[in-house]
Structures are given as C-alpha cells and as structure tokens.
Amino acid sequence: MTTPMFSLEVFPPKRNAPVGTIYDTLDGLEDLKPDFISVTYGHGTAADRTATARIAHTIRSEYGIPTVAHLTALYSDHEVIDRALEMFDEAGVEAVLALRGDELPGARVGVFPHASDLVAYIREKRPELKIFGACYPEGHYESKSLDEDIANLKTKVDAGASHLISQLFYDNDDFYRFLDKARAAGIDVPIEAGIMPVRGAKSVRRMAERNASRIPARLAALLDKWADNPEALRAAGINYASEQITDLVAHGVDGIHLYTMNHPAGTRRIWHNVGPLFTR
Ligand code: FAD
C-alpha cells in the first residue's frame, strides 16, 4: 500500500505582526517533515504577492521544505499574474495552487472569472510548473449541485491542474461520496483531503456557514458540551481531527492537507496521534 502524502498550510502573518511570528510557526512544523507547506494568498494586491512569495522562499531556502504558493485571480489582470509568477519562480516554489478567490461585493472581475482560466494561463506561461487546484467535497457554495461543481472541476483538471486539495469537511462520508463522483467523472489526479482542526465553537460555525459545510451531529455534540471550556474543546478537536485522518488513511486517500491556522502546537498534537500512519 502506498503511503499517503502529508502537507500543511500556513498563511502570511498580518503586516504589523512581529517579524519572528512566521519563524515561530515554521520552527514548530519543521520536524513533521511534510511533503510540502502551502502558503495562502490574499486578493491580489502587491503586498499579498510579496508576502506569499517571501514566506514560500523562507520555507524553501531556510527550512528545505518544498512549498506551494496559492494564487487568486478574480480581481487580477495578466500583468499582476505575470509578476506573481516571476516572484514565485524566484522563491523556488514546487507548484502554484491556482484559485479564483472569493467574490468581493462591488469589486470588478478581471480576465480570470474561473480558476480554470488561471490554470490555462499558467499552463501556457509555465509549461513545466506544477499546477494545483481546489475542490469541494460538499460542493462549492455557489454551485447548484455537487454534480455541477464536479463538472466544473473536470474543466479545471482538463485545463492543467494535476493535483487537488479539498476544502475542509467534518464528515468523511461527504469526502468519500465526492471522491466516487469525481473518479466517475474521469478526474484521476491525486486529491488530498483538507482537514481543519476545531479550535473554537464560534470559528467552526462561522467557517461552516461561509463554506456551506455541514456540522455533523457528532461534532455538534462536542461544540455544545464544551462551549464554555476552550481547552477541553481544543483537546476534543485534536481527537476529532485525528480520528478523521485515521479513517481517511484507512480508506486509502491520496493525502492529508492540514490547515494549521499557524498553530504549530495543535498541529503537533495531531501529528503525535497520526504520524506513524505516514511512515515511509
Ligand atoms: P473555481 O474553481 O473557479 O470555482 C468557483 C465556483 O465557480 C464553483 O461554484 C464552480 O463550480 C464554479 N465554476 C468553475 N468553473 C466554472 C465555469 N467554467 N463555468 C461556470 N461555473 C464555474 N482563497 C483565498 O483568497 N486565498 C487562498 O489562499 C485560498 N486558498 C484556498 C485553498 C484551498 C485548498 C481551498 C479549497 C480554498 C482556498 N481559498 C482561498 C478559497 C477559494 O478562493 C474560494 O473557495 C473561492 O470561492 C473559489 O475558488 P476556486 O479556485 O475553487 O474557484
């Protein structure tokens, strides 16, 4: 049986955060030896691309870990994307996670209305670069149905996305259903399962609402039981994520992508539980 991939996601700290913040995060993640660490991206300002490129460069050059740079395009033009790609070249990124980005009320959409448009553009500009894409086990919140979303996902893969990372989900059955449908639709690239450990009841509910993801009864019970005890809820969240990962690996998933939220301590506690599942 092949060992699944294990990857992590971090985000650039706020501009006014102390300069050591990202080092504290990366120091805490370094010895987990992930297959790659991906770095999120904002809506496309110059500051967004500099921050993502700078952190990707640090991960690559100072920690020796392969890195994937996220890139959103809904409000960008060709020039902005060209500049971002040049910066990612300099940072030595392993791949670009090509994203549309969320819609901002009132903002004017540019030349990349869908992620597949960005994927096709990068494919043309950088034929050798690996391109990743996002996918949604419960369907993207704008899609009428999971089937419609998967048909659009197939377009993204056909345009050149050779690796997918999923949105967070809390019920593995949703992921298995999605996987069956995606494979039946002819999507045969690796699909990593995105896992977001529970840290607080409010943030889970907010995130679930934003992404239209379901909170299964088993998780809702934990959120209710320890609503006033953040430490107990975090411990329960570590166990919940560890159990999700164990079950996913037992089902032979291609990989696990952990949304660290720049909290190495929680990530390490999960790794302590599941690390041996990823032994090569
Ligand atoms: P798309 O693939 O374009 O899909 C968006 C919607 O459009 C879907 O409903 C889809 O079905 C539909 N669609 C796609 N193609 C077509 C078509 N040709 N015709 C009609 N409809 C179509 N956001 C950030 O701002 N920064 C980040 O760093 C970031 N990282 C992320 C990482 C992961 C792993 C994931 C899952 C999401 C991330 N996001 C990030 C959020 C993402 O930007 C939003 O979910 C966004 O709303 C959709 O982006 P997408 O690339 O999936 O878009």
Image (spheres, rainbow, N blue to C red):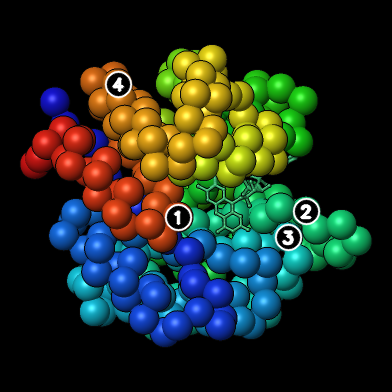
Q: What element carries label 1?
A: loop
Q: Which residue is drawn at 27% across and 41% down?
A: 270
Q: Which amino acid does label 1 sit on?
A: Met
Q: Which residue appears farthest toward the front when viewing the image?
A: 228
**Ligand 1 within 8 Å of the CB at mark 3:** yes
Cα gap from disc 3 to disc 2, whole angstroms: 8 Å
Is disc 2 surrounded by few (<14), some (14 to 19) or many (20+) residues within 10 Å? few
Disc nearest the viewer among 1 and 3:
1
**Left or right: 45 as drawn, with respect to 277:** right
Disc nearest the viewer among 3 and 2:
2
Q: Is mark 4 on a helix, strand or loop?
A: helix
Q: In this view, does 31 lie above or below 148?
A: below
Q: Tell me whether the residue at label 3 lies in contact with that at label 2, contact meaning CB atoms closer than 8 angstroms.
A: yes
Disc nearest the viewer among 2 and 1:
1
Q: Name the disc covering residue 74, or none.
A: 3
Question: Residue 48 lies in what quarter of the image?
Answer: bottom right
Q: What residue type is labelled 3?
A: Leu
What residue does disc 2 label? 103
Q: Is residue 57 above or below residue 137?
A: below
Q: What element carries label 2?
A: loop
Q: Tell me whether the residue at label 3 lies in contact with that at label 4, contact meaning CB atoms closer than 8 angstroms.
A: no
Q: Name the disc covering residue 261, or none.
A: 1
Q: Viewer-proximal residue, 252 or 121?
A: 252
Q: Name the disc covering residue 247, or none.
A: 4
Disc nearest the viewer among 3 and 4:
4
Q: Is mark 3 on a helix, strand or loop?
A: loop
Q: Which residue is drawn at 35% across and 53% down?
A: 8
If you read the primary sequence from the N terminus, does the residue marked by circle 1 or circle 3 appear first?
3
